[in-house]
Image (cartoon, rainbow, N blue to C red):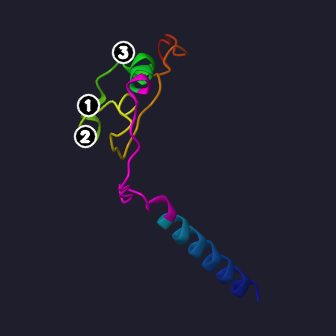
Amino acid sequence: MKSTWATTLGLVALLLALSHRGLACGSHGDNNNKNPREWTREELAELEAKWGFEWSFNGIGSFAHLDYVKCLTNPAEKYDIAIVGVPFDTAVSYRPGN
């Protein structure tokens, strides 16, 4: 009796995992929006003011050998991977030896 219950539970878990996989991979540029939004100059200037400057740690252009684009300053830019944030390495301290 336990093996039947475990098999049923395993099949349900497998079906749930496979159904979520389709949801996660379902929108890789497949949304062909016929009427994309027109961005005003003021909106683009605001985005440029917020995100247009270069950080000292820029240089992720080699990540997966993909082209580097600034998707936050150009909302019409299509992208698959976005890396947003600041590296957190201030908590590392000097620890000699093991």
| Nearest to N terminus: mark 3 or mark 2 | 3
7 relative to 34, above or below: below
Residue denoted by label 2: 66
Q: Position of residue 51 (x, y in %)?
A: 42, 21
- The answer to whether residue 95 is magenta is no
Say which of 53 and 65 sits in front: 53
Q: CA distance from mark 1 to mark 2?
A: 6 Å
Say which of 75 and 81 sits in front: 75
Label 3 close to label 1 by CB (< 8 Å): no
Q: CA distance from mark 3 to mark 1?
A: 16 Å
Please report the bounds of the magenta region as a residue range.
23-43
User: Relative to residue 5, is residue 21 drawn left or right?
Assistant: left
Quadrant location of residue 6? Answer: bottom right
Say which of 23 and 50 sits in front: 50
* Amino acid tagged 1: Gly
Label 1 close to label 2 by CB (< 8 Å): yes
The residue at 35%/40% (across/down) is: 76
Label 2 environment density (alpha carbons within 10 Å; few <14, some 14–19, many ≥20): few
Q: Position of residue 85 (x, y in %)?
A: 47, 26
Which label is found at residue 53? 3
The residue at 65%/82% (across/down) is: 7
Is most of the magenta stretch helix, strand or loop?
Answer: loop
Q: CA distance from mark 3 to mark 2?
A: 21 Å
Quadrant location of residue 1? Answer: bottom right
Helix, strand or loop for disc 1:
helix
The residue at 38%/55% (across/down) is: 33
